Image (spheres, rainbow, N blue to C red):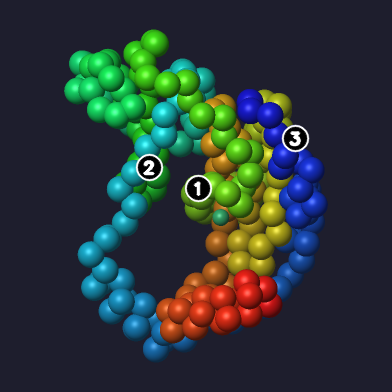
Amino acid sequence: MADTAATSANPILKEGHEDFDKEREYATRSPEDQRLDKIRRDANPAQGLSHTALRVKDARVTTKFYEEVVGLPLVRTDVVEKLTAMPPYDKPFDMMHFFFELGDGSLLAFFELEEGTGPELHEMPGDALQWHFAIQLRSEQEVRDVEKRAKEAGINCFYIPHDESLSLYLEDPDGFMLEVNHHRPHFDTLIDPKAAHERIEEWHKNGRRW
Ligand SMILES: [Fe+2]
């Protein structure tokens, strides 16, 4: 695992946050909002996340983490021979490209390159606010199950309090920050395209503070 001292020292990243167990009442999204959501989403040329792609040190270690801790199936491996050189890789190289599947058919993809290829991997920042990606689980229990398996495997993980989801953050074997969450009913009520634009303008007018 990458050094996690930076995340552990962050005061907002409290481990074992318990407020999520409280009963809460949530507004539901109105039928009119749902109708507009459908129109907007049907018109969107991007119909989903095809895949992410990250370079890792060892496909076996990555596979163990995503299958055994997170619970995703490995469904595809592309064996790439003598991939054409491209910056910053100055000569052709072999590559293992492998993919884990999510329930909607989208994929988390990874590369392991031929030994000695290209520059060393960058050290990841260990900063969930600088960079992370998130996958959505079916229940809060499934999020807690990932937490349990991560802790048993000695993997650093922590909750960041969100009202709209239960969100667990953990570092994968290469230091990439992964969020596993479960959306609460409140989640969709935060969709508001008009206010989204206005708030960005207001944020900057206020000198980037509220
Ligand atoms: Fe997130």
Q: Which mark is residue 5?
A: 3
Q: Earlier in the sequence, mark 3 or mark 2?
A: 3
Q: Residues within 10 Å of mark 3 (few under 14, many from 20)?
A: few
Q: Residues within 10 Å of mark 1 (few under 14, many from 20)?
A: few
Of the numbered discs 2 and 1, the one sitting upstream in the chain is 2
* Quarter of the figure with residue 186: bottom right
Q: Residue at x 52, y 76 (%)?
A: 200
Q: Is disc 3 placed on a helix, strand or loop?
A: helix
Label 2 element class: strand
Q: CA distance from mark 3 to mark 2?
A: 26 Å
Contact between labelled residues 1 and 2, with CB atoms less than 8 Å apart: yes
Q: CA distance from mark 2 to mark 1?
A: 9 Å
Depth check: 67 or 89 in front? 89
**Residue 180 visible, this orientation:** no
Cβ of disc 1 within 8 Å of ligand 1? yes
- Would you say residue 103 is visible in this rendering? yes
